[in-house]
Amino acid sequence: MSVALNCTLAAALALSSTMAGAAEIPYLAKAVANGALPPQSERVPQEPRRLAYSEHQAIGRHGGQLRLLMAKAKDTRQMAVYGYARLVVYDESLEIVPDILADVSVEQGRRYTLRLRPGHKWSDGAPFTAEDFRYFWEDVANNPDLSPYGPPQVLLVDGEPPLVEFPDPHTVRYTWKRPNPYFLPHLAAARPLYLYRPAHYLKQFHALHTDPETLAARVTQSKARDWVSLHTRNGHLYKFNNPELPTLQPWYNTTNAPAERFVFKRNPFFHRVDPDGQQLPYLDEVLIHIASAGLIPAKTGAGESDLQARYLRLDNYTFLKAGVQKSGYDVRLWRTARGSQIALFPNLNTQDEVWRKLLRNAQFRRALSLAIDRQEINQVVYLGVVIESNNTVLEQSPLFRKEYQTRWAEFDLKRANRILDELGLTERNSRNLRLLPDGRPMEILVQTAGENTEETDVLELIHDNWLKAGVKLYSKPSQREVFRNRVFSGDAIMSVWAGLSNALPTADMSPAELAPTSQDQLQWPKWGQYFETKQRAGEAPDLAPAKRLLELNKAWETAPDSQARAGIWHEMLGIHADQVYSIGLVCGVQQPVVVNAHLRNVPKAGTYNWDPGAYFGIYQPDTFWFTEKRRSPAE
């Protein structure tokens, strides 16, 4: 397998020639003229990533400031998400392609050779080379002070780390004894696995590279606990909270927290160019203004943001549309990519023995699903614009099959009641509620995190549906931590949360979310904990379909090719649709995306998703540009 950019030496030389004759970016022209920066042709790598634009993209012009609204200072990390500069990235077809890397070659799924772009530089102009990878691997990941638990788990296969080699300044190689299919997806993630650090900057905070007296003085001056704390604090590539830390993203932070306004300036050494050879990004600056989350929809409607989706919801749509003419923006509706906007999770590990036995019966879970009128939920809560569905993959995924979406998901109250009768749940009390085998009324307390009214509205409709089947639903909101602890401990019988976090998978993405592999999976937290802790805590799965899911997840790790991995995915998705381990309701809920009328290259229709997607990142915000009215160089 080989993932490579189609950039020959001749093409690289032609591009270099084009850039040499190109006009300098106005924002940087003064710095180039006085010698503070080299010319554009010397700032990009010898083989830059030359983008091939899609239908919604046009060649842009440099200049302008993009305004964003965020609710917290720590939201500066969203710039590492939106910028989406990664060693490899997902393209709009959800294929993994090189980005920061010139290419990746993969042998037998276990040997990955990464080739860097000669001439690539950090945002401060220092060379980006294999030394930055060596520094992370030897001086951070395998340093007992900085990494007491050793290298990141994703770099371990059967508990063993890879052999990491650095053949030359532009080559890094990772070799495992067995395939590691998780490697590239983690590099392309919204929150990626960073295999490198800016060694030239961080060595000043490292005990192996700085004399003790100088390092001690730096620790004292910064009021850090020790050099480990100082190094960690200054080295967060993802948090984007240290203006001194060099980056490879399209913009770099210039503002220390706390602040109400963060300024990100263009990275003069960014590695991407447009089809005409112009260095990206087009936008000079990105300004993040901090505001109360509750005020962000109103501020957006007043025209105070040029690109806004974060902190907006579908129920803001009507208000936002009313401000289109006055405030000069467009409101677009992008699809979200959760398996279900809201899903019910029967807790198969609940401590209540009577409920545990019942919830582990697939027929009971099927009856509850059949007794929900999803069409009513769609019309009443979502204005009829969403898709009624199980908690499964979306239609845009190559793994989608209609049966996964509809099995046991049609509203059939008569059939639901018949199934419940066949289970022997025929006795009822004076309120017409069915009785559990121990005589208690069939009352299901659904735990919620109580964070939005959307869940409340949906649960009220389900309450009315289930009453017709002799089942009463109560909801109990609580703080998120309390909510999670009730589920994890087994106190909860059922909970409500969002569905699959990645409903746009390809066969080469991990199916672990479908198997009991994490305590965070609300339908089987103790089984997930058992897997997560390598059998040191939790409980072993004791239902055959759940055991099969674990077997399939393990088989995916060693599957020889994409076709074999797709077969595993389909068996797992089929098990989920048939067993109804979670009760999905609707999917494809639309996300309002507000776009300044003068901003170009933002898709009219898109998918707003965390991973894969990095929200706006997959659509390359470095290619967004303003028309003349908003393009004057930032001062």
Image: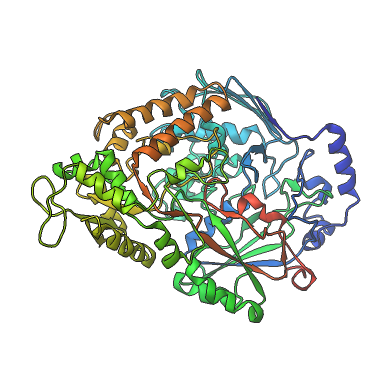
Q: Quadrant of residue 100?
A: top right
Which of the pair 396/198 is nearer the observer?
A: 396
Residue 233 picture location, percent across and down = 47, 50
Residue 395 picture location, percent across and down = 55, 46
Image height of 114 relative to 433, above or below: above
Is residue 233 visible from the viewing direction of this image?
A: yes
Image height of 634 relative to 230, above or below: below
Residue lying at 72% horizontally and 59% vertically, measured from the top left? 601
Residue 284 vs residue 206: left or right?
right
Q: Quadrant of residue 364?
A: top left
Residue lying at 36% horizontally and 27% vertically, measured from the top left? 548
Is residue 309 visible from the viewing direction of this image?
A: no
Residue lying at 64% horizontally and 32% vertically, measured from the top left? 130
Which of the pair 504/81 is nearer the observer?
A: 504
Image height of 315 relative to 517, above or below: below
Image height of 497 relative to 310, above or below: above
Which of the pair 547/29 is nearer the observer?
A: 547
Farthest residue in the left direction? Answer: 439
Residue 536 picture location, percent across and down = 26, 30
The N terminus sits in image quarter? top right
Residue lying at 28% horizontally and 63% vertically, measured from the top left? 464
The C terminus sits in image quarter? bottom right
Residue 344 vs residue 143: left or right?
left
Task: Identify the image's colour scheme: rainbow, by chain, secondary structure or one colour.
Answer: rainbow
Residue 370 picture location, percent across and down = 33, 50
